[in-house]
């Protein structure tokens, strides 16, 4: 399956890079270029969605010191895990192989089907989360900032969902224009909001040192949210293939360089945003935002008597959710199409792709609408559905391949592998603990 990027999407990069190749000679792998920068922004945009907007709530509830530990861990977690997944895709003998092709090549057809299924269920819950988040964000903005009456939830949700789906159905050209329009203001406003909140910082939490047990438990249970919030794995399959197409044998080095800059950008922008929000809100306010099931910027808009925050907060939330939806929807659609078509082929009843696409569109609209009306806890969905599957695919599967696949054997012996494996197991164990508790 080839999940796409969100703010510039892998499909977008395919188109742009193809155009570049027609106009110029192949790019040098040793030099940084505009296409590399676009990939960094695109991968950054993949991660900046509902996870980022809800991360300050969950991370901040545990206090300052666990949050500081998260900031130290999340950079290497993000880089090493995505680097390993990219290297896994690049380990295929087939230069055009996506992640499911690589799994099938290394582990067999049965494993290929399983990974396709798992990858779909890693991305599909995120798409559902966006249906809930966009409805809550717009409803809050209409009532709190515009002073309007709430629309019936069933009507508001289907209107918003159909609006986002219309862009996807209209085709990649329209989606390209919209996502390119969204990425730069999203980064700028997110940074601006972080700086704007600095005068409201309250450092009282720094003096409140938690017990070792509380510190460890908070850090442990928040790891799955960190995994989700910094995840750009839906883009990695297409990203890695594109690097191989462009750079050949130098694709691994180029991919590593792009992913390193992406992780640094995420760490800088996102953790600055998280710290700024957490230091400007009390634990009671964070708990209230969690109970309201709102992105933190929508909550900030409601509690700050300030035009800048009141209007730009919900706008950032809206833009981040919409842009993330595009990329994750493409990934979920491809995953579902792959599951249906592979199963139909195995049963000797191959289907036409256009019919499968139509079914997938209808299925997505219906399930998005139902979940948006039900309005489940977004944080609960992130922790219970997204975290463990993403951790399995992103953290553990490449580690298993490094140990078992000859083409990946050259990556053995790194301390980073131990770190990634431990963090993946920690993320999964935290979910199991919550479910059992």
Image (cartoon, grey):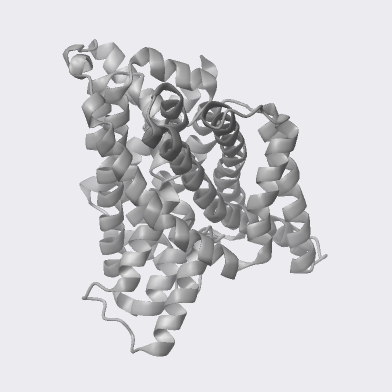
Image height of 55 relative to 332, above or below = above
Image height of 69 relative to 174, above or below = above
Image height of 19 relative to 124, above or below = below
User: Closest to the observer: 401 or 286?
Assistant: 286
Residue 65: which quarter of the image? top left
* Residue that protrudes farthest toward the right in the picture: 349
Task: Residue at 39% x, 12% y: name it.
Answer: 284
Q: Position of residue 117 (x, y in %)?
A: 62, 49
Task: Residue at 54% x, 33% y: name it.
Answer: 141
User: Closest to the observer: 163 or 330?
Assistant: 163
Q: Position of residue 60 (x, y in %)?
A: 34, 23
The answer to whether one can see residue 282 in this image is: yes
Q: Position of residue 131 (x, y in %)?
A: 62, 40
Task: Residue at 40% x, 16% y: name it.
Answer: 285
In this rendering, would 60 be left or right of 239?
left
Residue 274: which quarter of the image? top left
């Amino acid at each position: 399956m080839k999940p796409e990027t969100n703010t510039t999407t892998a499909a977008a990069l395919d188109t742009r890079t193809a155009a570049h190749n027609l106009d110029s000679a192949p790019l040098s792998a040793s030099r940084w270029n505009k296409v590399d920068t676009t990939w960094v922004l695109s991968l950054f945009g993949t991660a900046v969605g509902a996870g980022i907007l809800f991360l300050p709530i969950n991370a901040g509830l545990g206090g300052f010191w666990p949050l500081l530990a998260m900031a130290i861990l999340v950079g290497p977690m993000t880089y090493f895990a995505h680097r390993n997944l990219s290297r896994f895709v690049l380990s295929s003998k087939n230069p055009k192989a996506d992640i499911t092709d690589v799994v099938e090549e290394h582990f067999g057809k049965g494993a290929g089907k399983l990974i396709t299924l798992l990858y779909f269920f890693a991305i599909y819950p995120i798409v559902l989360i966006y249906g809930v988040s966009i409805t809550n964000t717009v409803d809050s903005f209409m009532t709190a900032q515009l002073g309007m009456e709430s629309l019936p939830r069933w009507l508001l949700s289907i209107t918003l969902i159909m609006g986002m789906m219309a862009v996807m159905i209209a085709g990649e050209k329209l989606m390209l224009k919209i996502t390119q329009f969204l990425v730069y203001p999203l980064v700028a406003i997110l940074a601006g909001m972080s700086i704007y909140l600095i005068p409201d910082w309250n450092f009282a939490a720094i003096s409140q040192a938690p017990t070792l047990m509380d510190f460890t438990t908070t850090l442990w249970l928040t790891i799955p949210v960190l995994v989700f919030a910094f995840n750009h794995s839906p883009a990695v399959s297409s990203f890695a293939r594109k690097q191989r197409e462009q750079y050949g044998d130098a694709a691994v080095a180029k991919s590593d360089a792009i992913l390193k800059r992406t992780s640094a950008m995420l760490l800088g922008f996102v953790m600055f945003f998280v710290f700024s929000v957490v230091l400007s809100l009390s634990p009671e306010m964070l708990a209230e935002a969690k109970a309201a099931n709102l992105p933190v910027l929508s909550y900030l808009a409601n509690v700050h008597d300030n035009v800048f925050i009141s209007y730009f907060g919900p706008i950032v939330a809206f833009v981040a959710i919409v842009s993330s939806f595009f990329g994750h929807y493409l990934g979920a659609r491809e995953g579902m199409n792959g599951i249906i078509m592979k199963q139909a082929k195995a049963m000797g009843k191959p289907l036409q792709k256009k019919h499968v696409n139509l079914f997938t569109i209808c299925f997505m609209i219906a399930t998005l609408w139902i979940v948006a009306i039900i309005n489940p806890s977004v944080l609960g969905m992130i922790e219970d559905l997204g975290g463990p599957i993403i951790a399995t695919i992103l953290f553990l599967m490449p580690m298993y391949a490094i140990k078992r696949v000859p083409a990946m054997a050259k990556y053995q012996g790194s301390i980073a592998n131990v770190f990634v494996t431990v963090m993946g197991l920690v993320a999964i164990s935290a979910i199991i603990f919550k479910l059992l508790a």
